[in-house]
C-alpha cells in the first residue's frame, strides 16, 4: 500500500509589504504595497482546498474563492482573474477594503490555528496583476434588449448593478451627483487606502462595456425619479448614506469643526492634499481630534497626521469595541495616532474669533452588562478635562441622504431615513424602483453594497425580461 | 404642590403621561415626513401604555414595581435642546424624548425629596424610577443606533 | 463638459457667465443656485442663477471677481468648456401673492434678486425694488428692474445716482412708502443681508435672505454650509438657501465664511503671477 503523505500544514500567513510607518505618515501613497508573485503563489499554496469550503458562503457576493486561489497556486493568473470577476466586478477595490477578517477569512478552516489564508491579499494580487497586463478584454455582450435602466448613484452598489445589467444586454445610465463616479470610494476612502486610479480604472471599464456615465447630475434636483420613470424601464437607487451626524453638543459650529465627510471630501475628491495645485483648500492644523471609532474615523485621523498634525482619536468606548478594521487601527497606531479611549467630548470651546481652541472631555467607564449583554459606557463624575485642539472632525457616522425619498412620492422610508427594500430582491414599495446599499442599510461596507447590487440586478433583469 | 393621598399622586402622574402623549401626538401631526410621523406616534403609544399601567396601579390591578436601581447612561445630559420644527430627524426625536423623560424623572425625584409622608416619598421614588426606565429605553436606542461608531 | 456661451464683465469686477445646461435650465426656479468648477483642479463654487432660457437651454450667473476661483471663472471665454455645472440646487424662493414685496439687491445680489422680483410680479405682487452700489457705474440690469417694479430706488454711496447713502436708508424709504409691506427679500453679501435684517426687525417686517456660506458638494453631504437659524443648525444647501433673516446667527456666518482667507491668498500669489508671466512671454 502506498504511503499516504500528509501534506504538512503551512500556517505561516505571508505578510503584506507595507510602507514603513515613519515614511508613510508623511505621504498619501498607498500603505499596503501588494504581494509579489512569489508571496502570492506561496500563500495560495497554503490553501488546503477544502472539499466543503466555508469561505464562499461568507462572501457577500459568493466568489469562488478556492477556485481563484488554486489558479494562483498553478500560476495561471489569467484563469484566476476570470474566476474572480465572475462574481466580483470591483476586485481591486474589495481586495483592499473588504473586512475579510469578518467574512471569508473568519471561516477559513485554518483560522483556529491563526493561519487563515490571506484571501483579501490574494484577491488584490490578481486584480493588480490584471491591471498591468494592458488593455482589458471586453467580454461579448448579448444583443441589446432595448430596455433602459437608470442607476442613481455611482457608488459600489450602483456600479455593480450597472456592470451586471450591461452584460445582460440592457442599456444602462448611471446618474451621479458629484463630478466623479465612485461614491464613497472616491470621496470617503483616502488615497493611501484606495488609490483613485483604481476606481477610475473600474469605472472606465464599465464605460467600455457601454454604460453611460452622467456626472454632475443630482436626481431629485436636476430631474426627479418620477421624470426618469417616463423614460426608463427600471430604476435602481444607490444614493448612499451621505448625511453626516453631528454630536449635537455646544460649539459644533465653530471654525475648525468638520464633519468627516467634509474633511475627507476636501482631501480625497477635491485632492486638497495637493493644494494649491488643486484649488480646494485644506487647513494645516496642529492638534486634530477625531471623534469616533469606525473606519471613517481612522481615515480622518491618519489623514490629519499626514497633513502634519498631532492627531488623536477620541472614542467613547474601549479598543475592543471599535468598529474599525483591526488592520486600520493597527496602521493608525503604528503611524502615531494617539488613542483617547473611553473619552467623550462634552463641548467645543472657541476663541474670540470663533475658532475652536479646546474641547472639554469626560472620561467614561464601562457599566454592568445590560439585558442585551452589552456593557455601555457611563461618564465618570468629576473627570471633566479641557484638552487643547485646533480642529475637530466628527466621524460618528452618516445616515441616508433624504433627497430621493423626499422627491419620490410613495417610496416607503424606515425610521432611520433608509429606503425600505426587500432583502432578497431590492424591490421597494414603488413599482419599477429597486434600491440597495447604504441608502437601504445605513452606512455599511462596500462589499455589502455590491452584494445588494448584485441581488437587485438579478431581480431587475427578471423583471425586464418578462413579457 | 400638595398631595393628600396616594391616589392624588397617581392622578398627577397619570396626567403627566397624558401630557407626554399629547406632546408626541402633536409632534407627529406636525411632521413633514411620514417616517417621522410614525416615530412620534410610536412614542405617543408608549406613553399611552405608561398611562394604562398607572391606571391599573391606581385601581389595584397592578402592584407598583419594587424599587430597583436603573442605569443612567447620561447620554442626553449635555446634548443641545432640540428646536421643534416640522423636519425633525430620528436623532433629534430621540434627544427630545431622552430630555423629556429626564425632566419627568427629576420632577418625581424632587417631589420625593419634598414629601414628608414616607409612603408618598416611596411612591414618588418609584415613579421616578419608571421614568428612568423610559429614559433608558431611548438612551439604549441612541447608543445602539446613533452612536454605533462612537 | 459644459459650454460657455457668454462671459463678460458687465460692470467693474462683476461678471456675467452664461452656460449651456439644458436640463438645469428646464427645471431651475428663482432662488436656486448651481455649483461650477472651472477646471479639473478647480473649487466647487456655488452661484445663484440670475437668469435662464429653457428653450435655448442656458443658465446665467452673476459673480463678483473677488478671489482665485471667481477670477478663474471671470477669465473664461465664450466657446470654452468647463467640467462642472450642477443644479438646480437649494430650495426655490417662496413665490406667492403676498401683496407688496420689497426686493433688495446689492452687488451680485442685484442679479440674483432679478428672477425673484420677476416671478413675484408675475404672481400679482406689487414690487418695490431697492438696489444699492458704491457708485452709479456699478449698477446693471436697471432697465429690467424698471420694467417690473412698481417703484424702483437706487442708492449710491457717492450720490452719483439715486439716493445718497447705503442700505441704511431702508427705514426712511419704508416710512415714506407709508403703506403695508408684506415681505422683504434681500440678496447680496452677508453684511448687506445682515444690515437689512437688523433694520427690519424692529419694524416687524418679514424678511427673507439668501445665505452664502462656504459650500463643497451642495447636496447636504458635508455640512460645511451649516448655519444657525433660531435654535437649530440648518444646511444652507438643502434647507435653504433662503432663511428668515431675523433668525440667522449673522456673526457666526460671517465668522465661518472667513475660514479660508489665509489659504485664499496662496493661489492668488502663485498662479496669477505664473499666468501673467506666461502671457508676457507669449507676447
Image: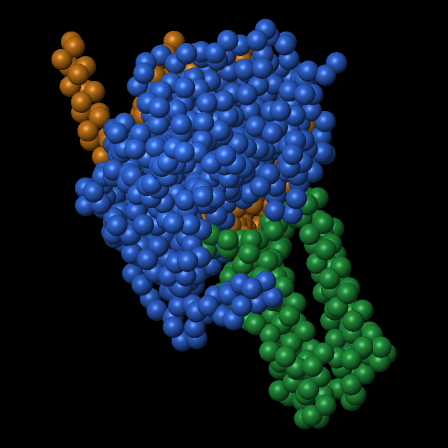
Chain colours: A blue, B green, C orange
Give x and y (percent) for residue A356. Answer: 34, 55
Give x and y (percent) for residue C136. Answer: 39, 27
Give x and y (percent) for residue A355. Answer: 33, 53
Which picture quadrant has residue B84?
bottom right
Q: Nearer the viewer, residue B111 or C143?
A: B111
Q: Nearer the viewer, residue B11 or A415?
A: A415
Determine whether A176 is above or below B15 in the image.
Answer: above
Determine whether C206 is above or below C94 in the image.
Answer: below
Identify the residue at horizontal 64%, vertical 70% (top origin).
B133
Q: Nearer the viewer, residue C178 or C267?
A: C267
Q: Locate residue A274 relative to residue C150 in the image: left or right.
A: left
Identify the residue at horizontal 75%, vertical 14% (top origin).
A467
Q: Is residue C1 visible?
A: yes
Identify the residue at horizontal 34%, vertical 17% (top origin).
C76
Give x and y (percent) for residue C266. Answer: 22, 35
Which picture quadrant has residue B9?
bottom right
Q: Is residue C140 visible?
A: no
Identify the residue at horizontal 35%, vertical 69% (top origin).
A385
Amino acid at each position: 500500500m502506498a504511503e499516504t503523505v500528509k501534506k504538512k500544514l503551512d500556517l505561516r500567513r505571508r505578510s503584506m509589504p507595507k510602507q514603513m510607518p515613519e515614511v508613510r505618515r508623511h505621504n498619501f501613497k498607498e500603505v499596503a504595497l501588494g504581494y509579489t508573485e512569489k508571496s502570492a503563489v506561496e500563500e495560495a499554496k497554503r490553501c488546503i482546498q477544502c472539499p466543503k469550503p466555508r469561505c464562499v458562503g461568507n462572501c457577500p457576493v459568493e466568489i469562488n474563492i478556492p477556485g481563484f486561489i488554486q489558479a494562483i497556486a498553478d500560476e495561471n493568473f489569467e484563469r484566476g482573474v476570470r474566476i474572480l470577476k465572475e462574481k466580483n466586478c470591483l476586485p481591486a477595490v474589495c481586495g483592499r477594503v473588504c473586512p475579510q477578517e469578518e467574512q471569508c477569512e473568519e471561516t477559513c478552516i485554518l483560522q483556529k490555528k491563526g493561519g487563515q489564508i490571506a484571501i483579501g491579499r490574494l484577491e488584490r494580487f490578481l486584480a493588480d496583476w490584471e491591471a498591468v497586463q494592458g488593455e482589458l478584454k471586453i467580454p461579448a455582450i448579448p444583443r441589446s434588449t432595448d430596455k433602459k435602466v437608470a442607476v442613481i448613484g455611482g457608488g459600489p452598489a450602483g456600479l455593480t448593478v450597472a456592470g451586471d445589467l450591461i452584460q445582460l444586454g440592457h442599456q444602462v445610465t448611471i446618474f451621479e451627483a458629484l463630478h466623479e463616479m465612485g461614491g464613497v470610494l472616491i470621496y470617503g476612502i483616502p488615497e493611501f487606502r484606495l488609490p483613485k486610479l483604481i476606481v477610475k480604472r473600474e469605472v472606465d471599464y464599465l464605460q467600455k462595456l457601454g454604460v453611460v456615465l452622467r456626472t454632475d447630475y443630482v436626481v431629485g434636483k436636476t430631474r426627479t425619479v418620477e421624470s426618469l420613470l417616463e423614460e426608463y424601464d427600471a430604476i435602481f437607487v444607490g444614493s448612499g448614506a451621505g448625511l453626516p451626524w453631528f454630536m449635537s453638543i455646544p460649539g459644533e459650529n465653530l471654525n475648525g469643526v468638520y464633519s468627516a465627510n467634509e474633511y475627507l471630501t476636501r482631501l480625497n475628491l477635491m485632492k486638497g492634499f495637493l493644494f494649491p495645485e488643486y484649488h480646494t483648500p485644506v487647513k494645516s492644523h496642529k492638534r486634530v481630534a477625531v471623534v469616533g471609532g469606525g473606519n471613517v474615523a481612522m481615515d480622518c485621523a491618519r489623514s490629519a497626521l499626514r497633513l502634519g498634525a498631532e492627531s488623536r482619536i477620541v472614542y467613547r468606548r474601549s479598543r475592543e469595541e471599535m468598529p474599525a478594521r483591526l488592520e486600520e487601527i493597527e496602521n493608525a497606531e503604528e503611524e502615531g495616532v494617539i488613542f483617547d479611549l473611553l473619552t467623550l467630548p462634552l463641548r467645543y470651546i472657541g476663541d474670540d474669533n470663533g475658532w475652536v481652541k479646546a474641547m472639554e472631555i469626560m472620561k467614561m467607564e464601562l457599566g454592568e452588562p445590560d439585558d442585551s449583554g452589552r456593557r455601555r459606557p457611563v461618564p465618570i463624575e468629576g473627570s471633566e478635562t479641557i484638552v487643547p485642539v485646533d480642529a475637530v472632525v466628527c466621524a460618528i457616522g452618516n445616515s441616508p441622504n433624504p433627497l430621493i425619498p423626499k422627491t419620490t412620492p410613495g417610496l416607503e422610508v424606515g425610521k432611520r431615513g433608509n429606503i425600505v427594500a426587500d432583502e432578497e430582491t431590492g424591490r421597494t414599495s414603488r413599482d419599477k424602483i429597486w434600491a440597495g446599499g447604504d441608502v437601504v442599510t445605513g452606512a455599511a461596507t462596500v462589499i455589502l453594497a455590491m452584494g445588494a447590487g448584485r441581488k437587485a440586478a438579478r431581480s431587475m433583469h427578471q423583471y425586464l425580461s418578462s413579457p | 404642590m400638595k398631595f393628600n393621598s396616594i391616589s392624588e399622586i397617581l392622578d398627577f402622574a397619570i396626567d403627566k403621561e397624558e401630557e407626554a402623549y399629547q406632546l408626541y401626538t402633536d409632534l407627529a401631526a406636525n411632521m413633514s415626513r411620514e417616517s417621522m410621523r410614525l416615530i412620534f406616534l410610536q412614542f405617543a403609544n408608549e406613553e399611552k401604555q405608561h398611562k394604562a399601567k398607572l391606571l391599573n396601579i391606581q385601581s389595584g390591578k397592578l402592584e407598583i414595581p419594587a424599587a430597583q436601581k436603573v442605569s443612567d447612561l447620561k447620554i442626553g445630559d449635555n446634548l443641545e435642546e432640540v428646536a421643534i420644527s416640522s423636519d425633525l430627524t430620528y436623532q433629534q426625536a430621540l434627544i427630545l424624548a431622552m430630555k423629556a423623560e429626564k425632566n419627568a424623572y427629576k420632577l418625581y425625584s424632587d417631589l420625593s425629596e419634598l414629601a414628608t409622608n414616607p409612603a408618598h416619598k416611596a411612591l414618588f421614588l418609584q415613579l421616578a424610577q419608571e421614568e428612568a426606565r423610559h429614559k433608558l429605553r431611548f438612551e439604549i436606542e441612541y447608543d445602539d443606533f446613533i452612536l454605533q461608531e462612537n | 463638459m459644459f459650454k460657455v456661451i457668454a462671459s463678460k464683465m458687465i460692470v467693474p469686477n462683476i461678471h456675467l457667465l452664461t452656460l449651456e445646461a439644458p436640463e438645469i435650465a428646464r427645471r431651475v426656479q428663482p432662488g436656486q443656485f448651481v455649483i461650477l468648477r472651472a477646471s479639473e483642479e478647480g473649487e466647487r463654487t456655488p452661484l445663484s442663477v440670475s437668469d435662464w432660457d429653457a428653450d435655448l437651454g442656458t443658465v446665467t450667473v452673476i459673480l463678483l471677481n473677488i478671489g482665485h476661483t471667481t477670477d478663474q471663472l471671470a477669465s473664461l471665454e465664450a466657446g470654452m468648456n468647463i467640467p462642472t455645472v450642477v443644479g438646480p440646487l437649494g430650495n426655490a424662493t417662496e413665490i406667492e401673492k403676498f401683496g407688496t414685496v420689497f426686493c433688495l439687491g446689492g452687488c451680485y445680489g442685484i442679479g440674483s434678486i432679478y428672477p425673484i422680483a420677476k416671478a413675484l410680479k408675475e404672481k400679482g405682487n406689487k414690487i418695490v425694488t431697492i438696489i444699492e452700489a458704491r457708485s452709479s457705474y456699478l449698477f446693471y440690469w436697471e432697465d429690467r428692474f424698471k420694467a417690473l417694479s412698481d417703484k424702483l430706488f437706487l442708492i449710491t454711496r457717492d450720490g452719483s445716482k439715486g439716493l445718497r447713502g447705503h442700505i441704511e436708508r431702508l427705514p426712511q424709504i419704508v416710512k415714506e412708502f407709508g403703506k403695508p409691506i408684506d415681505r422683504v427679500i434681500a440678496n447680496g453679501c452677508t453684511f448687506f443681508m445682515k444690515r437689512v435684517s437688523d433694520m427690519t426687525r424692529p419694524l416687524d417686517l418679514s424678511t427673507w435672505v439668501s445665505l452664502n456660506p462656504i459650500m463643497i458638494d451642495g447636496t447636504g453631504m458635508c455640512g460645511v454650509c451649516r448655519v444657525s437659524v433660531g435654535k437649530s443648525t440648518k444646511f444652507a444647501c438643502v434647507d435653504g438657501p433662503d432663511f428668515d433673516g431675523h433668525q440667522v446667527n449673522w456673526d457666526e456666518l460671517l465668522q465661518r465664511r472667513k475660514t479660508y482667507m489665509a489659504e485664499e491668498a496662496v493661489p492668488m500669489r502663485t498662479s496669477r503671477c505664473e499666468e501673467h508671466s506666461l502671457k508676457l512671454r507669449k507676447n
